[in-house]
Image (cartoon, grey):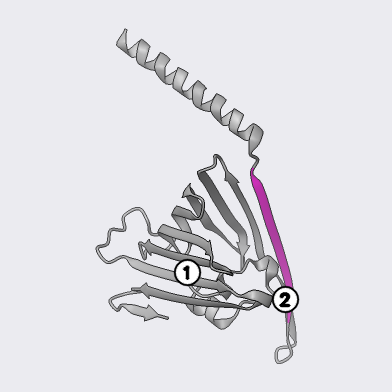
Amino acid sequence: MRKGKLILMTMCLLLAVCVDAQNVKNVYSPKIHGVIRGKYEYQPEDQAGRFEVRNAQISIEDTITKYVGYKGEIDLSDEGKTKMLDAYGELTPFNKFSFRIGQMRVPFTIDAHRSPAVRYFANRSFIAKQVADIRDVGGCLEYKFDAGFPIILECGMFNGSGLTNQKDYWTSNVNFSSKAQFFFPKGFNVTLSLQKIRPEDYIIMML
């Protein structure tokens, strides 16, 4: 009898969640973004060329309630490879304060955070590609406010395991990263960032 009641209660709970989700979706709808970048390269020395799909990204994000949101992003062809890019939930308990947990780009540098849709050239800068192209699993705090001009402060802690080594990765030496952005009038901005990583047995601090 207890088993039957438990099943009935579980079904009622699932039904309530589904009904509530349906009501939420009547107000909020997910935002879907995508970008496809194709390119052609020619090497005069070899007298040879190639076509390539550099990116085929698609993302979905939504604010489920006033305080809860999420984002998922995947690249179906990052130089021919499929990669999961972003997968995180976001809490916004206060108007200008938010907390993200999951898989995301580490808050460091400028160019690495630009979407492929707004880049001027087919390839990124050297810094963005070789130094700052880091996505990791962790938690990140963000605070936005206005001091006569917009300011965004971010800081986070991350595993240091990357995107494919999460399940059995345990560490007592987490990585961290912080970033401050100042958006001055007439299109000028200053970005300061600090990051600690540990690729192997050495700790590297980047500023």
The answer to whether residue 53 of the structure is visible from this angle is no
Residue located farthest toward the top when viewing the structure as drawn = 1
Up-down relation of residue 39 to residue 82 (above or below): below
Provide residue 32's location: percent of width, then percent of height: 67, 49
Q: What residue is drawn where x is 24% and y is 63%?
A: 172
Residue located farthest toward the front when viewing the structure as drawn = 148
Q: What residue is drawn where x is 47% and y is 69%?
A: 134
Depth check: give the residue in front, 86 or 195. Answer: 195
Q: Please check the rendered image and state whether residue 36 is part of the magenta-colored stretch, yes or no.
A: yes
Which of the image's four quarters has the N terminus? top left
Identify the amino acid type marked 2: Arg
Provide residue 139's location: percent of width, then percent of height: 40, 57
Magenta residues, start to end: 30-41
Up-down relation of residue 26 to residue 143 (above or below): above
**For this view, does 43 lie left or right of residue 20?**
right
As drawn, the label of residue 160 is: none
Provide residue 161's location: percent of width, then percent of height: 37, 63
The answer to whether residue 196 of the structure is visible from this angle is yes
Provide residue 80's location: percent of width, then percent of height: 61, 65
Quadrant position of residue 189? bottom right
Up-down relation of residue 190 to residue 13 (above or below): below
Depth check: give the residue in front, 151 or 118. Answer: 151
Depth check: give the residue in front, 106 or 123. Answer: 106
Identify the amino acid type marked 1: Ile
Label 1: which secondary element = loop
Q: What residue is drawn where x is 61% and y is 75%?
A: 184
Which residue is label 2 attached to?
50
Which residue is label 1 attached to?
134
Depth check: give the residue in front, 142 or 140. Answer: 142
